Image (cartoon, helix red, strand yellow):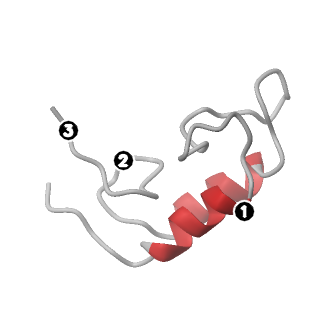
Amino acid sequence: LKIRLLGDINGDNTVDLKDVYAVSLAFGSYPGHPEWDPLVDLNQDYVVDLKDVFAVSSNYGNECPS
């Protein structure tokens, strides 16, 4: 079982620019959209929107012990 920090999209135990970049690439996407990535839909509402951006930004710079 791996525990991930909310916003750590790539699973490297840190919420950083790589995670912000992932959200920016998928922003506005939804299932069936070419940029859709379900890992970026952090609140699982089937759209990558400001709620997902907020989830990443609220934990930006935080680390989760590995």
Sequence-first disc among 2 and 3? 3
At horizontal 72% and vertical 62% (from top left) the residue drawn is 50
Which comes sooner in the sequence, label 3 or label 1? 3
Quadrant location of residue 40? top right
Residue that lies at the very extreme toward the front in this rendered image: 45
Do the residues bearing badges 3 and 1 touch, measured as CB atoms within 8 Å? no
**Residue underneath mark 3:** 2
The kind of secondary structure element at disc 1 is helix
Q: Position of residue 66 (x, y in %)?
A: 14, 54
Q: Is residue 64 visible?
A: yes
Left or right of 19, for residue 45? right
Say whether residue 64 is left or right of residue 53: left
Q: From the image, which quarter does the N terminus lie in?
A: top left
**Disc 3 crowd, CA 10 A, few/some/many (<14, 14-19, 20+):** few
Marker disc for residue 50:
1
Disc 2 on helix, strand or loop? Answer: loop
Find disc 2 in the rendering and name its residue.
11
* Residue type, mark 3 in image: Lys
Task: For marks 2 and 3, give the one nearer the viewer.
Answer: 3
Residue 49 location (% of width, % of height): 74, 54
